[in-house]
Amino acid sequence: MQARHWRGVAAFAAVTTLLAAFAGGAQARTDGGSGTTAAASYKVGIVYSRTGLLAAYGAEYIQGLRYGLAYATKGTMKVNGRPIELTIVDDGTDPTKAVAAGRDLIGKGYKILAGSVSSGVALQMAPLAAQNKVLFISGPAATDAVTGINKYTFRSGRQTYQDVKTAATFLKGVGKKVTVFAQDSAFGVGNYAAVNSIVGSQGHTVGRLLVPLSAQDFTPFAQQVKQANPDLLFVAWAGTTAPAMWRALEQQGTIRGTTVATGLAERATWGSYVPGLNFLSHYVAEAPKNKVNDWLKTKMKRRNQVPDIFTPDGFVAAQMIARAVTRGGDDVERMISALEGWQFAAPKGAQRIRQSDHAMLQPMFQVRTRQVNGKWRAVPVKTFAAGNTAPAAKQFP
């Protein structure tokens, strides 16, 4: 699930500080080893949301990408003796801008593109990659439609099906009426489709209430949810309007007497949730117990940082980029073969790229929040192994 409340300037500044060690602040900028020529580098285009509705996701993604490259290259930022050169472009969470940036990078000879925080952006970038036969690694974009869309497209994050499969574990003892409350976007529509498929197949009746992305007053929508009177309310939300949405639900008494399942967003939002929510999580730093997660937490602690919800998506993208060029060099077809079926250790735990459709199989979590000494903490409740939330396999068209 995507975020509920955006981190402030100070949190973003921490990411900017990390980036500043490698590059300047221009909208499109190149990060490479000093004294090397472009021809000697593996050129990778990162098109992501530095600004726009999902800028907080982008900050976490790019942060994770930096740490992931350091981990995958043992701090050298090189593979096969050649630097990995990143050109970073802001798409403003706008598919049109993202595609224009992608075309520009492809025209300059880039064979690897990554990023796509937004589902809408990813759905436009994936066909572009196939048309031009370049490798595309989507980021936190959750829509299920990215999986299996074409053989050139991979994902470094989870997908909506995995969210919903985890949330379905909250259904025990709950009545049969379910309402999906989400934004009218690729992300929101995808969540309804997944809930209807998974939960509906278990004998539940699934309705939906989709809210325009332009909405600012959520009271009328909260009233509609209250009138629907669901036994389970499944909330799928992204962007800066999340706090206002939650306030409206609480003020209208929508949550009282109803089981509510939603995704736990970034750490800055934990204190803004209303009591009594059931959280699924695709990552909190406290949950996974493995050496990669320990490495990431240790490195970030030195900068007074903590990995956040989408930090692993950037980290895994970096691991995938390093794997692709290590095994594939400059040949995209060989890069694809290197990634298909790859099993590896990531901050979340053991992950695998399914060969048939490039689904990213990964652990998922149940968590709860509580306040300890004035600070909100996430308490892991249950971990689901990658195979327990795996979406049904697809075939490429």
Image (cartoon, rainbow, N blue to C red):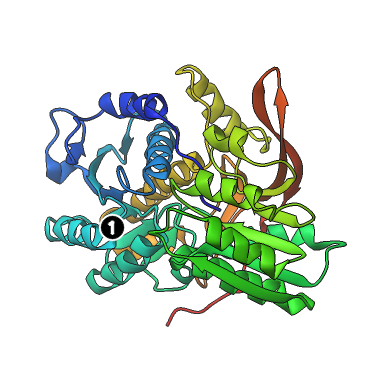
Q: Is residue 31 left or right of residue 220?
A: left
Taking the image as drawn, is residue 3 in sight? no
Which residue is depicted at the point 51% across and 46% down? 244
Report which quarter residue 161 is drawn in.
bottom right
In this view, the residue in front, 310 or 363, is 310
Q: Which residue is mark 1?
A: 94
Mark 1 nearby-residue class (10 Å; few <14, some 14–19, many ≥20): some
Residue 213 locus on image (x, y percent): 41, 60
Q: Is residue 336 left or right of residue 161?
A: left
Most extreme residue toward the bottom, as rendered?
A: 397
In this view, the residue in front, 390 or 322, is 390
In this view, the residue in front, 185 or 359, is 185
Which residue is depicted at the point 39% across and 24% down? 10
Report which quarter residue 168 is drawn in.
bottom right
- Type of amino acid under label 1: Asp
Which residue is depicted at the point 73% across and 38% down? 380
Residue 231 locus on image (x, y percent): 77, 65
Q: Is residue 262 left or right of residue 6?
A: right
Q: Is residue 30 left or right of residue 213?
A: left
Q: Quadrant of the C terminus?
A: bottom left
How many numbered dots are placed on residues in this image?
A: 1
Taking the image as drawn, is residue 205 in sight? yes
Q: Tag 1's secondary structure?
A: loop
Residue 382 locus on image (x, y percent): 77, 46
Which residue is depicted at the point 23% across and 63% down? 96
| Above or below 385: residue 50 | above
| Above or below 362: residue 37 | above
Residue 357 locus on image (x, y percent): 50, 71
Report which quarter residue 62 is drawn in.
top left
